[in-house]
Amino acid sequence: QSATPGVWDYTWLADVGEGKHTLTVEATDKAGNQTTQQLDFIIDTLLSEPTIVLDNTDDSGTKGDNLTNVNKPTFLLGNIDADARYVTVEVQHGGTKEVLTATKDATGNWSVTPTGTWADGDYTLTVRVEDEAGNEKHSASLTVTVDTQITIDAIELVN
C-alpha cells in the first residue's frame, strides 16, 4: 500500500513484454466482501525507422541521383508504423529550417510536398515519426539538388 490510504502500488517482478496485457486486481475487505477489476493496457516501446525518397516522377536526372528540375518535388515516405501520430519532414536549405507535415493517402501511403516552390540548390530532408505511445524515430537524411535552369555563358565563334 502507498502512503495514501486505499491506493496501492505494484512493481512488476520482471519486464512486461510488448503487446496487449490485462491487469486483474482482486480485493477482499475485513468483512469478506470481494471485488475484481481489470485494466487492459498496451506496452509499446518499438517504432520502425522511417525512410524518404524523391518520387520517381520528379527525379528528372538519372533515376536515383536525387537531382530534379522540379521546384516543388514530392517525396515518398516509407516504413511508417500504423500507429504513427505525427509524421513530419524537416527540410534544411541555406541555413534555414522548415518543417513540413506529411499526409497519408487512402491506401496508406505517406508523402510530402513543399508548400511553396524551392529555389535552386541543395536540400537536406529528415523524417520524424512519433507514435501513439510517444516513441520517436528519425530517418537517415536525404540530400536532393534542385536545378531548374541551364545557362550558356558565352558563345564564341572560332575561325
Image (cartoon, rainbow, N blue to C red):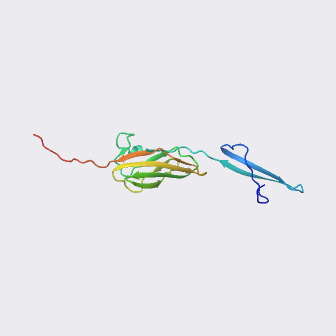
Residue sitting at x 73%, y 52%: 39
Farthest residue, direction front: 3
Residue sitting at x 29%, y 49%: 149
Farthest residue, direction bottom: 5
The one nearer the camera, 130 or 10, is 10
The part of the image, by quadrant, that contains residue 116 is: bottom left
Position of 62 with respect to 33 (left or right) is left
* Image quarter in which the N terminus is found: bottom right
Position of 144 with respect to 134 (left or right) is left
* Image quarter in which the C terminus is found: top left
Residue 49: x, y in percent?
Answer: 53, 44
Residue 78: x, y in percent?
Answer: 50, 44
The part of the image, by quadrant, that contains residue 14 is: top right
Residue 28: x, y in percent?
Answer: 85, 54
The one nearer the camera, 116 or 41, is 41
Residue 127: x, y in percent?
Answer: 48, 48
The one nearer the camera, 53 or 13, is 13
- Numbered disc total: 0
Position of 106 with respect to 41 (left or right) is left
Farthest residue, direction right: 31
